[in-house]
Structure formats: C-alpha cells, structure tokens
Image: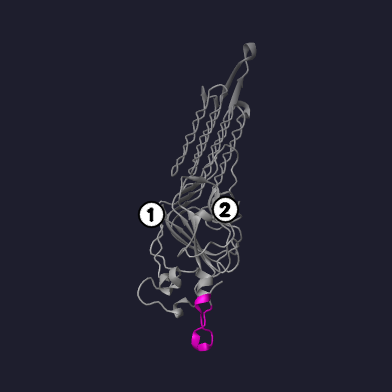
C-alpha cells in the first residue's frame, strides 16, 4: 500500500519495516540501497533514469522522510519481441517474467492496488487482419484493468507504434450494386482509471486510428431495341481503395461483367489506396468509379453509381468509417497525451 504522507512531528513516523513491506528488502537491510536508477533500454525498452518512486533520491543523502507518500512502481513490458496483434497489457502484467518492480527487491502483486503502474511500449502493435467488416471498437493494444487506487501511466518510446487496421475497399458491382468499404479499427484502448484523475500518456512514438476503405462502384447495363433482340451492353464498377493502417486495407476487386472495372489500390501504413475505374461500354453503359480509401486528414469516399440506359445504373457502395486513435471503456476515464496522435480521441467502447 502507499506509505503514509504525514510527517513524524505530527505523530506519524515511518519505519524501515513499512518501507521494506512496500518496496522489498534491499541487500544488507541498507536504506541506501533504495537509491536506484532504473533503465530498461538494454532490453529494448525506452525508460531511463527512473527512481524507486518520484522524489526518492538516486544519490547522496537518503532519509526516512524521503519515503512519505511513496509507493511501489511496476513496469509492464510491452517492448520486447516482434510486432503483435490486438494485445492486452494486463495479460503481459500477469506474465511476471515480463513485469518489473523498480528496484527489483520484491515480486509484482497478483492483485495490484495502491501502486504506480507504467506500461512501456517500444514496439509495434497492430490491428486484426482479414477481409470481414472491421469492428471500430477493436483496439490494437488494450491497457486492461488492474485494481483500485492505481496511478496509471503509459510511456511510448520512439520505436513504439499503436496502429489500427485499415479497412478493405468494397468490390465493384458486376452490373449490380457496389459493395461497401470496410471500417478501420482503433489504436489504444484505455480501461484503467488513474487515482490522480488523469492517465498520462507520454508518446514519443505514434498512436493512430485505422482508416476506412472506399466504397465499390456500381455496375450498369443498356439494352437498345432492334432486330434480333437489339444490342445489350454491360459494364462493371471499380473497386474501392484500401484504407491506411496496419495492416493496411486491401483494394476492392473490380466487377467482371461486360467491360470490367479495375481494382482499387491497396492502402499503406500512412497512405490510402485510390479507387478503381469503372468499365465503359461504348458510353452507353458505364460502371461507377470506386471510392478512395481513408488516411490521416482524409476520410474514405463512397463509390459512384453506375450509368446505363433505361435508368439501369446500379447503386454505389458506401465508404467505411475510421476507427479511433484512442478509445476509453468509460467516458469517465480522463487522459492527457503528449506526442503524435492520428485520429479521433473521444470515442468510448473498447474491445
């Protein structure tokens, strides 16, 4: 638990036993051993120069009075290993081999409370892959929940990226309607309140939404009356472009009836794919163009309706929506963030 905050002269002295119970037993039962300078940069993390807790000396004189109001600091390892998909930091906390108590004099708590938890991100977390419609509440990294009276902090290093997946573009209509583009997913999901009222996010990397895919273009046909049944013309719509994200959205396929539509372009981590062109059959049946995928500063667009004779043009596919950069499981969770964020930060609902 957090050590008491009252000074000794008010009848509330602090003991070595209380300090030991909070931070663990140092070598030789030596108070001076609590002057620590924590760094995990050698393991791929981005933290350096951290004391046992804020305000505890790292050199020079150390006194019992330096420990008033201090608490155990725990670092959650979200920095070792390769790129991960839709991870939960609480699961990493529960793997105690990936959880470090600063000082190293005690083990992490299985049921944490009354401590400071720092999630250190210094690698890439990405959204889900696949071609199904995306869930905008799905987050590449969720914080998870820990307990009561937690001071909660997220520290993202220069190699840290938390990026939602881009939505795939909709397929162009083969004479029929264009298909809708898929939604993007979200980046960071906040689920833990902070005792001091605000989750601090020190972001030296990137937090980004995944962006929606463009809608597919509608197909079209035309029938001119005449001898032997007249002439029939068909044209298909272009595919929608893929949205920016990680993984990026794929371009939708062009329709394949009559004059084919072309496929939309794939998105990239930071770029959107362009919509494909609709097929054109002698200017009498024209497939609609696919919509462009979305990226930072640019929403995805709908496909275009096909144009054919006798009002036969098929409907466009709708654009996919963007996920959020940061979502909260509850609107009561407050946070501050300093660094590069791409996308909405006011959405609620985390999965």
Residue 145 percent across, percent down from the top left? 59, 59
Residue 6 belongs to the span the image colors magenta: yes
Residue 262 percent across, percent down from the top left? 50, 28
The residue at the point 44 percent across, 77 percent down is 66
Q: Quadrant of the N terminus?
A: bottom right
Q: Residues within 10 Å of mark 2 (few under 14, many from 20)?
A: some
The residue lying toward the viewer, choosing from 307 and 315, is 315
The residue at the point 61 percent across, 21 percent down is 223
Residue 152 percent across, percent down from the top left? 52, 64
Q: How is the structure coloured here?
A: one colour
The residue at the point 45 percent across, 52 percent down is 79
Q: Residues within 10 Å of mark 1 (few under 14, many from 20)?
A: few
The residue at the point 60 percent across, 53 percent down is 350
Task: Note whether 11 is above or below 199 in the view shown.
Answer: below
Report which residue position mark 2 lands on.
91
Q: Nearer the viewer, mark 2 or mark 1?
A: 1
The residue lying toward the viewer, choosing from 126 and 17, is 17
Q: Could you tell me which secondary element the residue under label 1 belongs to?
A: helix
Residue 108 belongs to the span the image colors magenta: no
In this view of the protein, can residue 344 be seen by the observer? no
- The label shown at residue 67 is none
Q: Could you tell me which secondary element the residue under label 2 belongs to?
A: helix
Report which residue position mark 1 lands on.
42
Task: Note whether 324 is above or below 237 in the view shown.
Answer: below
Instruction: First in sequence, mark 2 or 1: give its number.
Output: 1
Please provide the residue range marked out in magenta. 4-17
Question: How far is mark 2 from mark 1, CA to CA?
Answer: 23 Å
């Amino acid at each position: 638990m957090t050590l008491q905050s009252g000074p000794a002269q008010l009848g509330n002295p602090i003991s070595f036993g209380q300090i030991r119970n909070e931070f663990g037993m140092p070598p030789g039962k030596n108070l001076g051993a609590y002057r620590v300078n924590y760094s995990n940069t050698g393991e791929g993390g981005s933290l350096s120069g951290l004391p046992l807790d804020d305000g505890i000396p790292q050199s020079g004189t150390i006194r019992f009075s330096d420990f008033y109001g201090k608490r155990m600091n725990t670092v959650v390892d979200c920095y070792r290993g390769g790129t991960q998909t839709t991870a939960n930091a609480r699961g990493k906390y529960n793997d105690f081999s990936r959880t470090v108590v600063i000082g190293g004099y005690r083990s992490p708590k299985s049921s944490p409370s009354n401590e400071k938890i720092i999630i250190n991100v210094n690698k890439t977390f990405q959204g889900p892959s696949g071609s199904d419609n995306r869930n905008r509440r799905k987050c590449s990294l969720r914080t998870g929940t820990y307990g009561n009276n937690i001071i909660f902090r997220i520290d993202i290093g220069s190699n840290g990226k938390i990026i939602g997946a881009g939505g795939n573009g909709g397929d162009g209509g083969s004479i029929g309607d264009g298909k809708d583009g898929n939604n993007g997913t979200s980046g960071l999901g906040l689920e833990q309140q902070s005792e001091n009222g605000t989750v601090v996010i020190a972001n030296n990397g990137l937090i980004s939404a995944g962006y929606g895919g463009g809608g597919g273009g509608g197909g079209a046909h035309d029938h001119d009356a005449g001898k032997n049944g007249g002439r029939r013309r068909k044209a298909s719509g272009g595919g929608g472009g893929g949205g920016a994200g990680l993984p990026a959205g794929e371009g939708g396929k062009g329709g394949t009836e009559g004059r084919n539509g072309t496929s939309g372009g794939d998105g990239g981590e930071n770029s959107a794919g362009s919509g494909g062109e609709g097929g054109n059959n002698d200017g009498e049946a024209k497939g609609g163009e696919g919509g462009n995928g979305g990226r930072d500063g640019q929403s995805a667009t709908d496909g275009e309706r096909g144009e054919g004779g006798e009002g036969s043009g098929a409907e466009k596919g709708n654009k996919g929506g963007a996920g959020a950069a940061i979502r909260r499981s509850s609107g009561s969770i407050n946070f501050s963030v300093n660094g590069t964020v791409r996308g909405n930060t006011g959405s609620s609902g985390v999965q």
